[in-house]
Amino acid sequence: MIKPFRIDIPQADLDDLTDRLSRTRWPNEVADAGWDYGFPLARLKELAEYWRTRYDWRAHEAALNELPHFTTEIDGQNIHFVHVRSSDPDALALILTHGWPGSFLEFLDVIEPLSRDFHLVIPSIPGYGFSGPTDRRGWDIVHVARAWAELMSRLGYERYGAQGGDFGAGISLALGAVAPERVVGVHVNYLPTRPDPDARVELSTTDEARLDKIRQLMANRPPYQALQATTPQTLGYALTDSPVGQLAWIAERFAQWTDPASPIGDERMLTDISLYWLTATAASSARLHRETPRRIEPCPVPVGVAVFPHDITQSVRPLAERLYDIRHWSEFERGGHFAAMEVPELLAEDVRDFFLTRIKHDELVATR
């Protein structure tokens, strides 16, 4: 059963947040530390004070409630999603999936341009936001992909496309693997390509530089990833109890993974962080790092890739083409990991180009 959903955070939860922020116990900091030891104290105090005294959750809640929200239960788990129908009843449906530390909020600025040509389904991953915490093992990206296939079936979409970045990219590719007869194509704006010593491919100087960056990341696993992949529950105690802890944990990612030329505003970032805090999903969202297997079944459907220069890594096309049926590849001069928020106009146009081209190709083949 699919039910309409309205966001209505209890006032007591908002009052509790304000109270906790006012009683923050701050650590000291090494003089002139900058970013050498982690998130700078002065900047975090600035964000925390803004969150406590000027940020208005109710205003954002009202704006979000203008969207059509729904919930349904799949495999015993609540699933929240936004469902925006195009004015064209025959439009292709797209399911857009966020990652960590994002949320369905990532796609707010691409809803209007994309809904001109597509029906849009924008779910919250189980364990994230209004889908609420998970309480069972096994909610990895393949399990999520199977849930998405069921969700699209319930909504009456027999053929559709999938798009995502970060975990959303992995889930979208997994969806293409579990439902290849229904997924017309997958578009991703994050596609890690590991070095492959057995690959006999010609690499450009740019490709080699990208691989060097990937090797460095593999050799020096980011601390956030190591903790979330090993002890997400232990980490969850701190983040669920301290709003400043949750703030620092996510704000650091926004600071380090975005293009300085297209920064994400504090209001949008605080809305995303508030969503994690108010739904107490720090631990359950982190579990996706632990649950997800290193290898999944290959995606047999056509794939489109958008590469942004300030993302965590940049894909190497010759290696990607050994794994996927790449039909579309775009390289951009600006944008980072949160492309849908940083450069929504570029991402929306690239998604449109890929799927409309994909549709035209399928129609041409069908008439032969």
Image: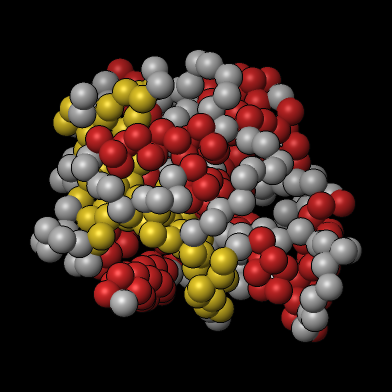
Which residue is at 73% across, 54% downward?
Answer: 35
Q: Is residue 39 left or right of residue 301?
A: right
Q: Residue furthest bottom?
A: 205
Q: Is residue 241 left or right of residue 225?
A: left
Q: Position of residue 229 (x, y in %)?
A: 70, 33
Which residue is at 44% across, 30% downward?
Answer: 126
Of residues 358 and 51, which is closer to you in this image? 358
Q: Is residue 310 above or below residue 164?
A: below
Q: Is residue 164 above or below residue 132?
A: below
Quarter assignment of residue 249 = top right
Q: Is residue 331 left or right of residue 60?
A: right
Report the label total. Answer: 0
Quarter assignment of residue 239 = top right
Q: Position of residue 110 (x, y in %)?
A: 31, 62
Q: Is residue 265 left or right of residue 363?
A: right
Q: Position of residue 338 (x, y in %)?
A: 50, 58
- Position of the C terminus by quadrant: bottom left
Which residue is at 61% across, 51% downward?
Answer: 298
The answer, for residue 145, to whether it is visible in the render is yes
Of residues 26 and 123, which is closer to you in this image? 123
Which residue is at 80% across, 76% downward?
Answer: 201
